[in-house]
Amino acid sequence: MPQRSYGFTLPVTVPFFYVSQVTGILQDEAIWPGIPESLRDKLAAAKMGWDGLEITEDSLNEIPDDTWVLIEAKLKEIGLG
């Protein structure tokens, strides 16, 4: 598993009302297949609850490098990167 450095403190909880927005960004046809199934399951569960989504370093490290490149490009495209 790769060890990466992130620009924020982990774990972090994404409030439930942002989970749909995050999911929408990640469901880009080029990005979604690279998101590990375990993280997709967590996103789906968080969309149906009030607790939000806890993101850990381990869950982010499961995302392949090539998918991170796509995520970075998407965030820049929408003005968040």
Image: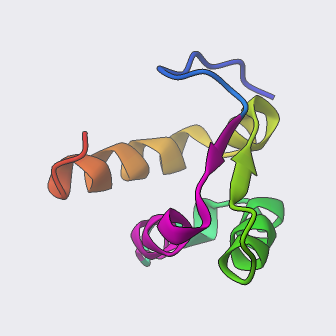
The answer to whether 64 appears left or right of 66 in the picture is right
Q: Which residues are magenta?
A: 12-28
Nearer to the camera, 10 or 3? 10
On whether residue 20 falls in the magenta region, the answer is yes
- Secondary structure, magenta segment, majority class: helix
User: What residue is rendered at 29% in x and 56% in y?
Assistant: 74
The answer to whether 23 appears left or right of 57 in the picture is left
Nearer to the camera, 60 or 51? 51
Residue 79 drawn above or below residue 16: above
Q: Quadrant of residue 52?
A: bottom right
- Number of labels in the image equals 0
Q: Position of residue 62 (x, y in %)?
A: 75, 43
Quadrant where the C terminus is found in the figure: top left
The answer to whether 78 appears left or right of 47 in the picture is left
Q: Position of residue 26 (x, y in %)?
A: 48, 66
On whether residue 25 falls in the magenta region, the answer is yes
Q: Quadrant of residue 64?
A: top right
User: What residue is rendered at 72% in x and 24% in y?
Assistant: 2
Farthest front residue in view: 50
Farthest bottom residue in view: 48
The answer to whether 57 appears left or right of 19 in the picture is right
Q: Position of residue 72 (x, y in %)?
A: 35, 43
